[in-house]
């Protein structure tokens, strides 16, 4: 059963109001990784909670406890749980999304203020932090609800919602909540399947359904020595310099072709067979797609299968930054007293943080020992999550395939995603249900980057897709 034509027309007719709602959401700088913005993440939770309530959802805000961030104890932002419909004759779909965003400053290289949604009338881009990751997709669900609420039409399925404000910072507190609420009598008891809209198409043309995510383990390594920052003219070549030690250490983690140098990490992953390679060969993707999305001709290889395997089924190690280093304009001749390098490893099955972390820690210590430095090394693991792979022949995926065909007139590609949404596996394991990733945005949206955007057509057609998926799911499972 396709979605009613009236629903599709309603989404088109209300597009401008939906974009205004997205602008209101983007205007709240809900950056979970910045202690100074914690109030804005909480404000965003209340804004979203009010929107859901106004659309007929029975909601509650759940306190997730506290965290320590940058040496400061902070309240975690509340999660939002919601229920709409409790008809025992209907399937119950759990919807997850996150209302926090990555940091963004105009000085990072944005052309416009990151927290003011800019509507580019010429190319249809909606530019602003969170437009694609993940406020646009969350609001896509609200657009679906608005039609049904306003017209007094019941949805074809029951819905449960779980929205969090810490996804970009390790989803602190959420696993415990999901595990508790999955128990008999808990909030999620009776959920039949889950849907997450929080990733992207591979390219700018072909919709995708996603059945895998990489896991993650995130490290902070700190080298400290002098009691204070030093003058390099006075102390250069007289003391062990923390930055020199750290750069050596970071340089031993990964080579310039992406190979991970920590012994045992790459070796955990079995090589692909020809059958698996054929899956990647069939996907609509080319070197040009990754280079267009990256904004330069810098792909590691021109072999499409190798590129796709690099993103989907192989681990990767990325260096993210150095805290405490001189990073302002000018030529300050300082020796920083304490510097912290940040890096993460994206994990694939059968890797887990529990298996990989000890190898990384042992390697960092042994490489550091080789430097014979009198400085001090400390290693912290900031957060982690396991990889996830789902059965894409399940009716949950079948419903999404039909909806994609109905809205976009083409079959979706089936992909595994290089990013991480740690709670996905928690939903799959603790609820024992199939989880589908149904993305809204395109591969060039620039999530986590400067000038993040969501195309207007992806927002509007994507809203139709989310609604159509619910109708197709109800039809496919009618007698089950
Ligand atoms: N859209 C999902 C996403 O961007 N997830 C983040 C999760 C994360 C973990 N630590 C910091 N962020 C990702 O980087 O994949
Ligand atoms: Zn996201
Ligand atoms: Zn993200």
Image (cartoon, grey):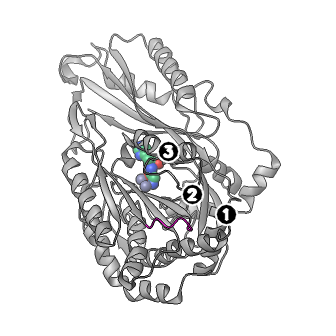
Q: Is 433 situated left or right of 29 in this image?
A: right
Q: Label 1 near label 2: C-beta < 8 Å?
A: yes
Q: Which mark is residue 184?
A: 3
Q: Which mark is residue 193?
A: 2
Residue 232: percent from the left, percent from the top? 22, 23
Identified at 55% across, 22% down, the residue is: 359
Mark 2 or mark 1, earlier in chain? 2
Q: Nearer the viewer, mark 2 or mark 3?
A: 3
Q: Main secondary structure of the magenta part?
A: loop
Is residue 261 positioned above or below 465 on the image?
above
Query: Which residue lies at the image location 75% right of the left edge and 43% below the top edge?
Result: 272
Q: Are marks 2 and 3 in contact (CB under 8 Å)?
A: no
Image quadrant containing the C terminus: bottom right
> Earlier along the polypeptide chain: callout 1 or callout 3?
3
Q: Quadrant of ligand 2?
A: bottom left
Q: Which residue is mark 1?
A: 395
Seen in the picture, residue 303 relative to 400 is either above or below; the reply is above
Count of numbered circles in the view: 3
Disc 1 crowd rating (10 Å Cα; few below 14, some 14-19, many 20+) is some
Q: Is residue 98 left or right of residue 251?
A: left
Residue 112 pos. (x, y %) = 27, 67
Q: Decide: marks 1, 3 in contact (CB < 8 A)?
A: no
- The magenta-colored residue range is 85-90
Q: Position of residue 397 (x, y in %)?
A: 64, 63
What is the spatial separation of the Cα atoms under label 2 and label 3, in whole angstroms?
16 Å
């Amino acid at each position: 059963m396709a979605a009613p034509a009236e629903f599709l027309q309603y989404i088109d007719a209300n597009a401008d109001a939906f974009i205004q709602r997205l602008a209101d959401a983007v205007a709240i700088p809900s950056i979970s990784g910045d202690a100074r913005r914690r109030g804005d993440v909480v404000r965003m939770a209340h804004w979203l909670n009010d929107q859901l309530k106004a659309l007929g959802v029975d909601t509650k805000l759940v306190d997730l406890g506290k965290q320590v961030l940058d040496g400061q104890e902070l309240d975690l932002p509340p999660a939002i749980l919601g229920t709409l419909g409790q008809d025992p004759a209907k399937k119950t779909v759990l919807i997850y999304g996150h209302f926090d965003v990555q940091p963004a400053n105009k000085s990072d290289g944005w052309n416009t203020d990151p927290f003011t949604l800019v509507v580019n009338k010429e190319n249809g881009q909606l530019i602003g932090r969170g437009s694609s990751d993940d406020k646009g997709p969350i609001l896509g669900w609200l657009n679906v609800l608005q039609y049904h609420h306003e017209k007094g039409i019941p949805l074809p399925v029951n819905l449960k919602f779980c929205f969090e404000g810490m996804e970009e910072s390790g989803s602190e507190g959420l696993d415990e909540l999901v595990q508790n609420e999955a128990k008999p009598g808990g909030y999620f008891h009776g959920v039949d399947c889950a849907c997450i809209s929080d990733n992207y198409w591979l390219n700018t043309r072909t919709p995708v359904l996603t059945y895998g995510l990489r896991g993650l383990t995130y490290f902070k390594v700190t080298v400290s020595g002098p009691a204070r920052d030093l003058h390099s003219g006075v102390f250069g070549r007289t003391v062990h310099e923390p930055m020199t030690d750290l750069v050596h250490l970071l340089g031993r983690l990964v080579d310039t072709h992406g190979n991970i140098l920590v012994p045992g990490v790459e070796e955990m992953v079995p090589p692909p067979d020809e059958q698996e390679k054929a899956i990647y060969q069939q996907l609509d993707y080319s070197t040009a797609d990754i280079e267009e999305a990256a904004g330069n001709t810098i792909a590691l290889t021109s072999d499409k299968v190798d590129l796709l395997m690099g993103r989907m089924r192989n681990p990767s190690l990325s260096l993210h930054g150095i805290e405490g280093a001189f990073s302002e304009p000018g030529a300050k001749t300082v020796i920083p007293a304490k510097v912290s390098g940040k890096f993460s490893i994206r994990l694939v099955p059968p890797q887990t943080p529990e298996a990989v972390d000890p190898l990384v820690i042992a390697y960092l210590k042994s490489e550091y020992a080789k430097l014979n430095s009198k400085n001090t090394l400390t290693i912290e693991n900031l957060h982690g999550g396991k990889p996830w792979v789902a059965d894409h022949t399940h009716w949950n995926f079948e419903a999404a395939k039909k909806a994609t065909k109905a809205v976009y007139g083409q079959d979706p590609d089936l992909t595994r995603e290089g990013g991480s949404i740690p709670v996905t596996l928690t939903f799959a394991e603790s609820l024992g249900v199939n989880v589908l990733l149904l993305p809204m945005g395109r591969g060039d949206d620039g999530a986590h980057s400067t000038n993040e955007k969501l195309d207007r057509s992806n927002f509007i057609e994507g809203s139709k897709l989310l609604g159509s998926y619910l109708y197709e799911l109800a039809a496919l499972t009618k007698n089950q």
